[in-house]
Structures are given as structure tokens and as C-alpha cells.
Image (spheres, helix red, strand yellow):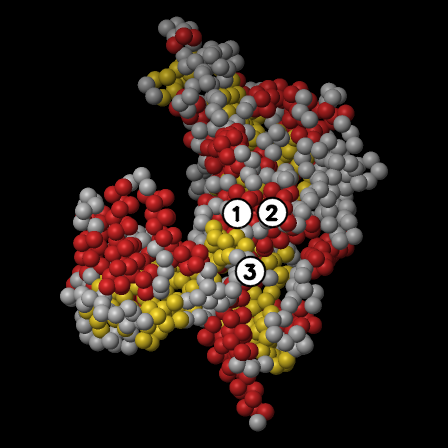
Amino acid sequence: MVVSIEPPVTKTKPTPVVEREEITVRFAGDSGDGMQLVGTQMTNTSAMFGNDVSTFPDFPAEIRAPAGTLAGVSGYQLNFGARKLRTAGDTVNALIAMNPAALKTNVEDLEQGGILVINDDAFNPTNLQKAGYKENPLENGSLERYQLFRIPMEKLTAEACKDTGLTARNIARCKNFYSLGLVYWLYGKSLEPTERWLQDKFGKKADVLSANLKALRAGYYFGETTDMFSVRYLVPAAKIAPGRYRKVTGNEALAMGLITAARLANKPLFYGSYPITPASDILHELSRHKNFDVRTFQAEDEIAAITSVIGASFAGALAVTGTSGPGVALKQEAIALAIMTELPLVIVNVQRGGPSTGLPTKTEQADLHQAIWGRNGEAPCCVLAASTPADCFHMAMEAFRIAVQYMTPVFLLSDGYLANGAEPWLIPDPSKLDKFVVKHPTTHNDTDHFLPYKRNPDLVREWAIPGTPGLEHRVGGLEKRDITGDVCYEPDNHDHMIRLRRQKIDNIAKTVPPLEIYGNTNGGELLVLGWGSTYGPITSAVERCRSKGLDVSSAHLRYLDPMPQNSGEILKKFRRVLIPEMNLGQLRAHIRATFLIDAIGMNKVQGKPFTINEIETQIGSLLHQQNGRKS
Amino acid sequence: MSTESSVIQLTAKDYASDQDIRWCPGCGDYSILQQVKKVLATVGAKRENTVFVSGIGCSSRFPYYMSTYGFHSIHGRAPAVATGVKVANPALDVWVATGDGDGLSIGGNHFLHTIRRNVNLKILLFNNRIYGLTKGQYSPTSPLGKKTKSTPDGSVDYPLHPISVAIGAEATFVARSIDVNVKHLEHVLERAAKHKGTAFVEIYQNCNIFNDMAFEYATSKETKDDTTVFLEHGKPLIFGKDKKKGIRLHGMNPEIVELGGDIKEDDLLFHDEKQVEPSLAYLLSRMHFPEFPEPMGVFRAVERPTYEDMLMGQVDAAVRAKGPGKLEDLYDDGETWVVN
Ligand code: SF4
């Protein structure tokens, strides 16, 4: 179906409204078109209206790829719903494409019969050529399976803004708000929150404010006055726990979790980091909050970042470094030093597509083995993984809790999907957060001196810090004699210390919450086991399958080393275990090695998350095979 | 718990740990260790507030032999570890012990950046122009043509000159001394201890096992007066057995002149360690044996705000402007909404 609007047909009767459980919209345009901005506005407006929301931006890898090219396309996907959402949506119900390149790179994700809103003005021969189109796709019938709406957004925006006093060039930049206005109309959203936001943002620049407002309203009224769209969609408010909410990305939540831990511990927070996509936003976020005694150090390289963190930890700060996979590879020697010196610190790895430079702006989960095994020697440390953007807040605090309680480096794995994806976050009451008490000894732990490697029953040594008289001691990377910490090359001592360091990490499991089953707590035919950002698609897929009556459950590991104490017991309750991961089977290898369970892999390494549908299909076919065999 | 260390005047001995020293007998490191302990006593350093950080190499065993806090870290990274210590607790006195391989080869990057930030650390570079701990390969300060186990036909690497590198990175304090000239070494170390900012000291250190006599020219009675020149702030550069030779500037270049006759002391180059522009210090750092006597002493000592002072200044300013951070405010950033 193709609708063109010249001349606009005036509406004869109100457009009918259809109710939907959830809708997925994607804004796509050139990176200079302001797609992230309008996507964020749409998200905030939907959330304020009471929808659950889940979003994911898709940035180009190049900072400013030439305008109009495929490499320069920036996208923002929003899923808003009347029910709990766990992903940014599998297939797109409506795509707004601001130029041919945006159309080309995004149209495949649009559902059959989906709404395709096109900025018609951008489909000129130059742009078509830049996008690699030999002929205009709007006119050759190739888009027939979508509802195509060709709207000359630039002309209509220029018309709406002609009296604002802005130059034509600046007016053209308002077309993103025109598209937003139209989408607001289509989904029955109020203009009010965005109008308020524009007021706050451009209050001092009357012409810019007025142009953006006019563009926004013009888009809205366009929907209102033409007969172009045959239906509008409404997504009712979701049932959400009462309270005050804000939207958080994984990186924001992670930064807040780190600050919270330091505040609760009454400690300075030291963040040593080298800029790297997609972790840099944590550095940016933390450096804005110096009044929390946050001390950020932008190091000269990844190694300086981790070693400065080791120094800061030795001196008594809550210290953390953040990076992505390539940075972790560089840090590993130093992480082993922190293991040997038994100092508390956190290493955040916001995983991205690898190996080598790989896909810097895309997501992947292929650093699990690097975190668990990636160092020389027997070098165990604790490994955690956040499961949703908001969960990054909690897991950041957990990482520090374990680091300090067990005097060990702790890996916290996030990924590009969690880092940049956003969801609503129920703002916690700080007074209700668990206390975080950090103790440093001030007296000798032996008759007349201090033994740096004397341990408590959990095998944890004390965190004595410089500035404390009488507890002067030396640490280092050479093997330690048990208890005294003196350099020691004796074979039996080395064997003992190797086992002791491993046992200390295993002891952490005592404080790890048990693994929970979503579904049949007594076990059953199939368990889908996940870790990290696959939580969303796995849980929603299992929910759908269960509603169809399939015997499937799920469990999600947020603690990877050590795993919850009941992990083996839970896995063994199920006849089969499926492990979807965005790698070639790293958790699966770990599970097989640890529990001798022949888990089935489901592996996708495309730089993008699983869809709910993919996992649902896989569950279906596994259970179908099973049934087939039985009958 | 002992608090006496805070009140009682300590002597050099009090800074020694109970560990046996494992350097080869006759190694120049012993002298450096001894002079450092003396200087700590002189400046009244508190053991509990002093931290020695090192990397890997013979010199990096240093922290084990001190009764202060200490960190024997990994190869090349000591300046970065020390930066973390200093930023976490700026009240600590932090020293780095490193060598020519540790500091300038594997750790060259941290060396440069720590110096340029002017973190208030004392960096002692034990330069023996060889890899000792790995048993005798050439180092980045070994001269061209040096025959070692890894360069049986002679090294084809041009050496780095540590003082030139430090000045290039605009170190606020740069000095050189020699292990065997204990008085001079002690004096230079004391100046370094009292400097606020990164203090870099290159110490010519004899490795009697793998590179014995590398600094013979600068230490032997017969030659040292002609091969070294002692820098003193505000004084002309005069050297030689009878103090008859001097350094004069000829255009942009130094030249050796004989005093007496036409040439007076006033014609000579006068040392000015406080010049903000590092050009003079750099010029001095380019004077090498055998063409020139090698300068000993303080090349440069200027003031500049330190990294940690500026960073903590920003933290304090943020607290003054916004008040000590409240978690409520942190969470409430941006748009919020209420679900009833
Ligand atoms: S090898 Fe050389 S530098 Fe190392 S301890 Fe022996 S003499 Fe000293």
C-alpha cells in the first residue's frame, strides 16, 4: 500500500483507534538527524504515561561518517507496552526512516504490513546513490509488503517554521521533531512532556524553541488532519509497582551503583580508566559527581588504569576500573597481581564484539572465559554479570560488597546492549539500602607485629592501609609465605597458597543468593539457562512458551564464579538444559566442565541480541523433537 | 600498636625491614638503600606514612628492605600504582624505585605520563645500563655497540638518556647522582624528598655482575674530575682537577674552555635550576661522556601545582558548590515520574 500526500486529503471522520499490548517503533536517520533525541523523548513520554518501556540505540561505529551513507545511520528502538517488557522488541511495528541509507539498513527488521514512514524529501538521486540504491525503492514496488507513507517532512517543516526567523538550514534540523509529532499522534501520546522539555532546553533561544515546537505540532496535526492513516494505536498503561521512576541505561545504573557503594562505605571512590567504547560513559558519568568524593583518573593506557586502581585499593579507596574486552586483555597481568596481593577492587567489562577491535559499538558476550580463566597461573577471581540495565545498579554494589568482604578483585560483566539499553528504574530509598561497613585494622594481629596474610575462617586477610602506625607491611606479586606474606619459593607453600586462593573464591558462594527457577520449581523437561543480557529475551520467550502450555522453565546466573551453591542441583532437575549465549558456548563449556551436564548450545554472534522469537522457536523445536520421539 | 614512630626521631636503621637483602655483594643498590634511609631520618619521615612502590628488576626489590609500607608491583607499572596510592591518600609520601629497563623500556609510557602530570612522587631510577635480574641483556640505556648475551655482535639500538626524557616530559625536579658518591647522593635525595611534585633522580648504579665498571669514567679517582661537572644553582659550570675548566655557551651549544687568559668565570654558563623553560636543563642533559663532563646534581627544580592537589581541589570545589553528595539527589537526576 502506498499513500502519497499531494495534495493532503482533509479528514472526513476521526481515525479509529486500535488497542495493542505493546508496540515497537524505530527512528532511523543520519547520525546528524537527531534520532537518539526524539527516541529518548518518545521513551520518556511513554513511561510518564504509564507504559513499561525498553529501548536500545544503534550507533554508527564512525563518529561522523559522511552524511547520507550507510555507515552514518543512527537508530533508536523503543518498545512500550501495557505489560512487563524485557527487551526492546523483536520486530519493528513502525519504522521512521529519514533518508535512503536509514531505510536500507533498517527495513528488514520491519514486520510484514508494518508502518513505514519516509521523509520523502531525502530520496533524491544523490542520497539514493550514497545508500547504494540503483533505483528509488519507494517507486519500484520493493516495499509493497509494508504500509508506506511518503511524507515530505523537510518541506512541511519549512512551511511550519517559516516565521520563526531561523535560517533554512536550521529549520531543516527541526524535522526530527516533525517526525516525533507525527508518531505521537499515531500512538495517541501527549505532546506535553516534550513541549516542557523543549521549554527547559531552549527557553533562552526563543527562535529555536519556537521552531521545534512548531515542527512537533505540525507533525501531530498532519496526522490529525489527513486521511492518510487508517488506524491509530493505543497501548494502555502497564501494571507497574507503585513508586517514583526514572529511566536508566546500564552504564548510568552501574555508575550510580559504584557511587552508592562508596557513599554507604563512607569511602572515596577511585575510578581509573582509559576511554573505550562502550564503557566510556561510566567515566563521563562518574566525573560529573565529584561532590561524592569521586576521584576519576583518566589513565595513559589500560594498564595504568588497572594498576592505579591497585594502588588506590592498597591505600584504602574503593577502587574500580572500567573497560571493554580489548582493555581487559591488557589488564590481565595486573589483575593477577591484585589476586596475589589479595586487594579488593572491581573490574567492569562492558563487553563488545570481538576479537581484536571487532565491533566496537555492537554487543557480545564472548569475554566470559577471559574473565574466569584469562590470566597466567592459577588466578581465580570472582565473576559477576548484570542481567538488565537496572540490574547494573545492584550488581555494582554487589561487586564491591564481595571485593571487600573477600579481599579479591571482582569482575562485573556488562555488555553493549545493557550499557546503552534503557528501562524504567524504581528509585530506591537510600535509607533502606543495606549497610556497607568496611573495616581496616588498627592493631597488631599477632603478639607484637602485623601478619598481612593471616586469615579469618573464610580465608580472608585484613585490609591494613598506609597511614596506620605499626601495621607497615609489604605486598607484591612474588609468591607469599602463608600468614607472614614474606616472599617464599618453597614447593609445598606454593601448592598450599594456590589451593587456598581458589578456596577463598569458592567461599564467596556462601554469601551468594540461590539460583531461582522461573517456571517449574520441581524441574521438568527443559531448562533455559542464561547469563548477562540474555535475561530479557530468554525470560519473555519462556513466558510465552509456558502460556502455550510447554514444559519449559528458565534460570539466570548473575554469579558465574563462584556460581550459586544450588546451581548443580537445579540443573539436574531438568532433563535437558538449553544455553543461549552471544558467543560460541562459553557458559556451556563452564557448565559441562563443572557439572558434567551435556547442555545444548544456542549461539548467535551477530553483534545484536537474541530476539524473543528466536529463543521461543528453539524451545518449541526442542520440545517438539522430544514429543516426536515419544510418540 | 606503636605510635612512638610519630614522635621519636628515627635513625636510618629504623627504616630497615627484617628481610635479608638479596642483592649481589658489591652491588650499587646497597649504597642507594643506605642513603635513602638516611634521608628519611633527616627529613623526619613517618614510617606509617611512607610508601615505596617498585616494578620488576633488581632495583625493584627495594620495598622489601624498608620498614615502611611497600608494594612490589609488576614490570614497568610502579609509577601508575604509585599514582593510585597518592590520589587515594594524598597525605602519604610515595617513592618509586625503578631501573632503566623497568622505567624506560616496559614502563616508558607510565614514566612519561606520571612526570607530565606532576604527581607528587619521588622516582629513583637505578641506571646500570643493563638487565641484571634476567642475567645480562642490553637495556634502553646501554650504549650503541654494547656486547651482551642478547647482542653478541653489539647493540644496534641508540640509547635513551633518562634525564633528557624526564625534561622532555617537563619534570619539575630532575637530578643525577652516583651510587659511590654517597655524600652527593644523600644531598640530591634530600632535595628530591623535599620537592613538591614529581622528583626524578637518575642514579648511576654499578652492576658489578653484568656490567661492571660501566661508570668507571665518572667514579675513578683518575678521571672523575674531568668527566663530571657538579651543578650548583647560580654558580658557573667549572670542573677539572684544578677547577681550571669550564663550560661556556657558544651560540646554542656548550663548549669546554680553559679558564685563565681571556676567559673569566663570568663568561661561563651559570646554572639556573629554577628556569621555568626547560631548555637550559635539556642542554645540560645532552652533555655526555666522552665529549663532555656529565653534569651531576639538580638540573631543574621548579614549582607547579601537583596532579593530586588539582584533582582534590576539584573535589572540594564540587562539595562547596553542591554540598556533600546525597544519594537522593544522585538518583533524582533527570526526568522522573510517579506510578500510583
Ligand atoms: S645483578 Fe647487578 S644490579 Fe642486580 S643485584 Fe646483582 S649486581 Fe646488583
| Res. B331 mark | 1
Q: Residue at label 2?
A: A430
Q: Residue furthest top?
A: B261
* Chain of the residue displaying label 2: A
Which residue is at 54% across, 74% downward?
Answer: A542
Looking at the rendered structure, whether the residues under marks 3 and 1 are on a common chain is answered as: no
Please state which of residues B141 and B89 is positioned toward the viewer in this rendering.
B89
**Viewer-nearest of labels 3 and 1?**
3
Q: Position of residue B109 (x, y in %)?
A: 48, 40
Label 3 residue SS? loop
Q: Do the residues labelled 2 and 1 touch (CB within 8 Å)?
A: yes
Q: Relative to B230, is A426 above or below? A: below
Instruction: Name the element at disc 2.
Output: helix
**Depicted A35 relative to depicted A473: above or below:** below
Q: Look at discs 3 and 2 and give the one toward the viewer.
A: 3
Residue under the point 56% across and 35% down: B324
Where does residue A389 sit, x and y in percent of width and height? 51, 58
Q: Which mark is residue A241?
A: 3
Q: Hey, which quadrant is residue A522 in on the image?
A: bottom right
Confirm whether residue B237 shows in the render.
yes
Rounded to the nearest whole Å, what is the CA distance between mark 3 and mark 1?
Answer: 18 Å
List the single residue furthest toward the front: A13
- Under mark 1, the amino acid is Tyr
Residue B6's x, y, as percent? Answer: 72, 24
